[in-house]
Amino acid sequence: MKISKEMTAAINDQIKAEYDSAYIYLGMSAWFESEGLSGMAHWMRKQYGEEIEHTEKFIKYLYERGARVIIPGVDKPKESYASALEVFQTAYKHEQYVTERIYKLVDQALAEKDYATQSMLKWYVDEQVEEESSAEAIVSKLECLGDSKQALYMLDKELGGR
Ligand code: FEO
């Protein structure tokens, strides 16, 4: 069964959202480097890599369905942040936004009775649980640190092990 034009367009749109996510994290990584927090910078670069994988998974799926992939332009990410806490809060909110987008894709696949797309999206539904949870866990840790520079550098070291 052929994938619909509407579903193809929605997945292409999500490909852009995943590339934008990758760039948001790459921008966060650059900010952490400029702040001397190389562990957090490393964590964000890993996250960037994951987003590229998410993108490529969607691209491969569209090819498998014989659909046209449109390689999008990417939005310029934010350059600076007030604190490490603000960065991870932003990342957490961003992941919640991505989850909403994935759920909308699931809704559309259900409405179209596109079982193949529903099945493919299950991986993303599960992945989003992990994505939200890892960002939220770091937000909680940063909230506990308060203004302690020493604790911040210890957390930085921990996140460098990702
Ligand atoms: Fe591709 Fe972090 O969602």
Image (tube, rainbow, N blue to C red):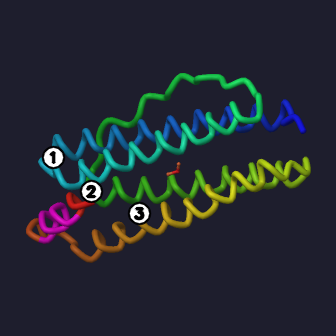
Seen in the picture, residue 82 relative to 142 is either above or below; the reply is above
Viewer-proximal residue among 34 and 107: 107
Residue situated in front as seen by the camera: 152 or 59: 59
Q: Nearer the viewer, residue 119 or 154?
A: 119
Q: Which is closer to the viewer, label 3 or label 2?
A: 3
Ligand 1 within 8 A of label 2's CB? no
**What is the magenta range?**
151-158
Q: Secondary structure at mark 1?
A: loop
Closer to the chain start, of discs 1 and 3, is: 1
Q: Which residue is mark 1?
A: 35
Compared with 126, 16 (above or below) is above
- C-alpha gap between disc 1 and disc 3: 20 Å
Residue named by callout 2: 84
What amino acid is found at the position of numbered circle 1 in the picture?
Answer: Glu
In the displayed structure, 76 sits above or below 87; it is: above
Give the Cα distance between marks 2 and 1.
9 Å
* 6 to 41, vertically: above or below: above
Q: Quadrant of residue 14?
A: top right
Q: Amino acid at mark 2?
A: Ala
| 55 lies left or right of 11 | left
Residue at which label 3 appears: 135
